[in-house]
Image: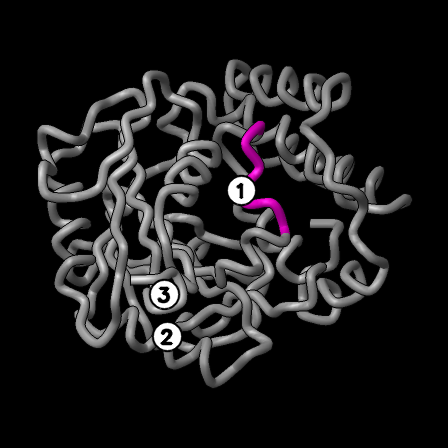
Amino acid sequence: MTEQSIDFGCVVLTMGRRKEELESAVTSLLSQEGVTIDVIVVGNGWDPQPSFPHLKTLYLNENLGIPAGRNAGAREVNGENLLFLDDDVKLHDSRMLAKMKNLLAGRREVGLIQPRVISNVEGEATPKRWVPRLRVGNPLASSVATSLWEGSTVIRRKVFDEVGGWPDDFFYGHEGIDLLWRTLDSGYLPWYAADMTVQHPVINPTRHSYFYFLNARNRVWLAKRHLRFPFSFLYPLVWLLITMTRIRGFKSLASWLRGFASGIVSSAKGRGKMRWKTHWLLSRYGRPPLI
């Protein structure tokens, strides 16, 4: 089949530490109806081939980070659209990708889609951070997205290629905001599809030892590589002030401040500043590039 005849190239990223969840994620993909898919399991520092001998796999000898791992997988699959799926995320509906395909076909202005995320434990509350807008409101209401929960992301292949994919240098944290901003800057809408759902465990992102450092560094990198002055100055300043009031514990705050300083003295590979129109659109859709 040619790339045009395949609806979705699907990249499942894993480090091989959650075998049961990974199997469930892949099964939910292979159970999709009404679409053609090309699936690859990417092992970030782990060889997935023995576990998935009948699927396309990619073994990365070292952990390159989440964005670079996804980009590596995207280069190996065909499809008019791309789906990026974390190994602990399960598609909740066997027709979900068919719904995504119909949405993209019917709304040519939409370039990126995040589905609604629900807990894999029945009755457990959904964290507000999973709803990709500043004013969360009703999680069941679809809207333009102004942030991104990256665990299950669909994007048109042509948009992904145009914006340069995920930001390799970020390793972990805020790579979704980078991709979303660039999608909007390229003239497409990022969309929160509340009528399409995936399941994910409710876990605290601060469990990662590097969370605070990379969270801060990448905030500064976002501003330096995308925002125009004065937003390039105000965005990290606002987040510095917010963090000083939020973080409890000297060790966590010190790690965040080290990351903030690292972001100032270093830079990710640049893509050029976004248009002023994009700054305005972010504000219009409810999240000015200050927060």
Q: Provide the secondary structure element on which disc 3 rests.
A: strand
Q: Residue at x 26, y 61 (%)?
A: 37
Which mark is in front, 3 or 2? 2
Q: Residue 40 sits in which quadrant?
A: top left
Q: Residue 63 sits in which quadrant?
A: top left
Q: Residue 6 sits in which quadrant?
A: bottom left
Which mark is in front, 3 or 1? 1
Which residue in the structure is indicated by mark 3? 116
Q: Residue at x 47, y 32 (%)?
A: 68
Q: Which mark is residue 101?
A: 2
Q: Is residue 66 within the magenta segment?
A: no
Q: Position of residue 67 (x, y in %)?
A: 47, 36
Of residue 107 and residue 277, the one placed in the foreground of this image is 107
CB contact under 8 Å: marks 3 and 2 = no
Q: Position of residue 99 (x, y in %)?
A: 32, 77
Residue 57 versus residue 141 in the image, above or below: above
Q: Provide the secondary structure element on which disc 1 rests.
A: loop
Mark 3: amino acid:
Arg
Q: Quadrant of the N terminus?
A: bottom left
Separation (CA) of disc 3 from disc 2: 16 Å
Q: Position of residue 50 (x, y in %)?
A: 9, 28
Q: Which mark is residue 166?
A: 1
Span colored in magenta:
163-169
Q: Is residue 162 left or right of residue 95?
A: right
Residue 182 versus residue 226 in the image, above or below: below
Separation (CA) of disc 1 from disc 2: 22 Å
